[in-house]
Amino acid sequence: MRAIPWLLLALLALVPWMGLGNYILHLVIMILVWSFVYTSWSLMGRFGLVSLGHGAFLGIGAYTVTMLWNHFGITPWVGMVAGVALAAVVAVLIGYPCFRFRITGHYFALVTLALSEIARLVIVALRDQTGGSLGVTPKTALAGGESYSLFALQFAQKEVWFYVMLGCWLFALWVWRRVDRSMARYAMEAISQEEDAAASVGVNVTRTKLMITVLSAAMTAFGGVLYGQYQLYVNPDTVSGIGISLQIVFAVIAGGMFVQLGPTVGAVFTLLLAEGLRVGIGHDVHGLDTFIYGALLVLFIIYMPSGILGKLSELWRRRAAAPQGAPARVRL
Amino acid sequence: MQVFDIFLLEAILNGLLFGGVLALLALGLNLVFGVIDVVWICYAELMMIGMYTVYFLYTVYKLPLIVAFAGGVLVVAVLGVILHVLVIRPVLNSEPINQLLVTGGVLFFLQAAATLAFGVQFRNLGVSLPSLQLGEIFLPYSRIFAALTALVAMTLLYLFLRKTYIGTAIRAISQDRAIMPLMGVSPARIYLVTSAIGGGLAGLGACLLVLQYDVHPAIGLSFGPITFLICVLGGLGNMVGGFVAAFIFAQLISVGGFFFHIEWGYVMAFLFFVVMMFVRPQGLLAKKA
Amino acid sequence: MLELREITAGYGSFQALFGVSLKVDAGEAVAVIGPNGAGKTTLLRVVSKLIDASAGEVLMEGRRVNEVEPHRVIELGIAHVPENRRLFPRLTIEENLRMGAYVASARAHFAERLAYVYELFPRLAERRSQLAGTLSGGEQQMCAIARGLMSKPRLLLLDEPSAGLAPVIVQRIFDLVHRLRDEGYTVLIVEQNVQQVLKVVDRAYLLEVGRIKASGRAADLAASDDIRRAYVGL
């Protein structure tokens, strides 16, 4: 039983060799990179720190790397450090006053919403440098027909990106598990339920919240870097603003906010839905996927707040606990 | 640049006018929050539907503008009630963040619905009003009209809240919800009335803005976030605070946009918000702790 | 007029009342006394339907109250003046009184009731435009009772009106209760101040840990050994 996840992982690792074609590979890569982002967001979300501003961190990551590369020729390896650091600084800048003054719940969500909008506006306002609403492409380092440039962090072959993303995704899951097992997790849970009580037993509320926020922001920014380098195109609406922020929230809620693989399930769900609609209904029907997301988000919050995976694991646990003859079966 | 520039004055005046409409929008949001304790994240999207309503009633069905306006207000008022009954009520007893997220879903839903139904192209109402000329300053009549209407509406709302039984009940419920039944007031009914008023205010805002801006499915994004920030800055639920904050923001946008590019005006306004969070996190004139 | 039969009620898993029965006849003033946590406030809340009883019946003038919606209880002629006054702090005195007259039947007579209430409480008349949150404890209690009277109730429920008030004010409150009874209101008053309340009511019930331990005429209870032993200062 316990071997199943490892078997699946091995299977996943072999995907590029299965001859499924570039399109499928691309889909899987997108699922992996968004799973990374969603999992990073859920580090905060599961403890009640619902941020509607993670679009800002995505944008900071993607744009910092691209700008430094395009304007100064600075390698994305350095650029990513800069992007992640900048995201961390912003996280502290916003997080500290919020946590210090006990701004939580929907106030916090609104403040973070402001953040993602500021990021989007700044990106658009700096149109001369960033290309504004039209977006920007990192200058290619593969003009000479090479298939990769380590310096520019660009790879022509999807297979390479696949393994990069796979690794990062696994890293995100690992971080999730570490946070889950650590003292910080108990602290955060105590905080999310009863802040004063937590503070009175010595939990440094502000510091704990800040740590989680910075971690989440930094990882999200890194996700932005990955996304930008893979897609080789970023624009302010895909990587900042309220739209993307809400999409992150939706995916995590749909998948299951309190479970390790929940965000991943959310990514699979949203991406397959979007692709399915695109393929089934055609390119011309703008907005059908968002229409369904919107309706589903409403329905999920009302009827299934613990998400798909959450609901399933709940059902599984109930089944397993029931004193019935038949053994509980794993449902995937 | 001279310190006293006539065009700076124009920017300031335009800012005042813009502030009037923002104040109206903020009022609707604050009212709903103050009474029901829910933030309608999709507030601007409700407004967007109102704008489309006015557009279609006026340009397609060729109804008189005043009828189109009435239609706009009515449609969004009804939409507000539907929103409350179908979406908010089921989650009223769960965590506040769920209520926020559920309206986020509605935001997506409405934006996409509009895209599917009307397409992404910008639509203009086609009503062209002249501008009032004061020396070298031009103040568009559409903007003046909007600001005046907004002020009248806010005054009417104020009188309603002060002088009528229901208005008093609306003010009372945010002060002590639990004892309302003892007064013979059904909180559920008050919520419906408030949702209708909140929607109606958004609808009115739509009427006023459709005169000045083209309507398209994403226009909510241009007004939604700024409205939230105004409300948070003024203290969520605090109608006077929201009123004041609206004008401050409008000035920042207008004057900031005057000195730099218009987007920087917005950036400045948002940054001001962030700074205020450091200085006075509970909002300028916060009512609720 | 009011009858409670075998009322069982509580909050979630915590049960506060165990099969409580009592009666209040028209024109009477009845007190429910007992220590803290006995369930006295819960009792009143069951009558005004702020909470639902899990078992038992509440009858008002022969009609079952169990099915009535909370906000319609006032239409039955029951006015509940809650514990801790619970005025609307940012409304003026007059606006609070207006809320008391919210029901349609009361609105029609608002002016007349307002005059009556101001005559009863001249201090309130003086300060009618003052915000309720700025009043002193005694004034707030007056206002809360006045608000309850605005709907011309037949049954007045008073929840610990003397709580937290200075002795001089307490005296005035009980004088008021006595006066209200004389004017024809039926009063059910819940109190911890046993000594004073037994002087102004006709009958009383002793509630302890959710059950009626004793009942009878006020004078008899006041003289009873149980009461004297349990409550110091009697």
Image: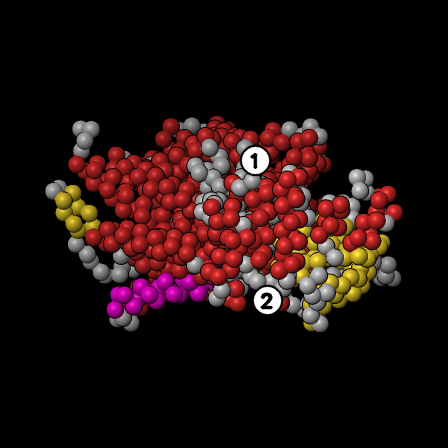
Q: Is residue A11 above or below residue A170?
A: below
Percent position (x, y) of residue C82?
A: 64, 52
Residue depicted at x 46% and y 41%: B235
Q: Position of residue C33 (x, y in %)?
A: 76, 50
The image position of residue B147, as x and y in percent, is: 28, 51
| Lateral position of residue C61 relative to residue A300, left or right | right
Chain letter, disc 1 residue: A
Q: Which mark is residue A102?
A: 1
Start-end of magenta stretch? B64-91
What's the residue at 83%, 53% (across, down)?
Answer: C220
Tell me the amino acid under the disc marked 1: Arg
Task: Find numbered disc 2 in the image and state the secondary structure of the residue it sits on.
Answer: helix
Q: Which residue is mark 2?
A: C75
Indicate the quadrant containing the N terminus of chain B: top left, top right, bottom left or bottom right: top left
- Distance, label 2 to label 1, CA atoms, is 43 Å
Q: Residues within 10 Å of mark 1 (few under 14, many from 20)?
A: some
Residue B115 % position (x, y): 40, 60
In reply to whether residue B80 is colored magenta, the answer given is yes
Q: Identity of the amino acid at label 2? A: Glu
In the shown orientation, is residue A281 left or right of residue A314? left
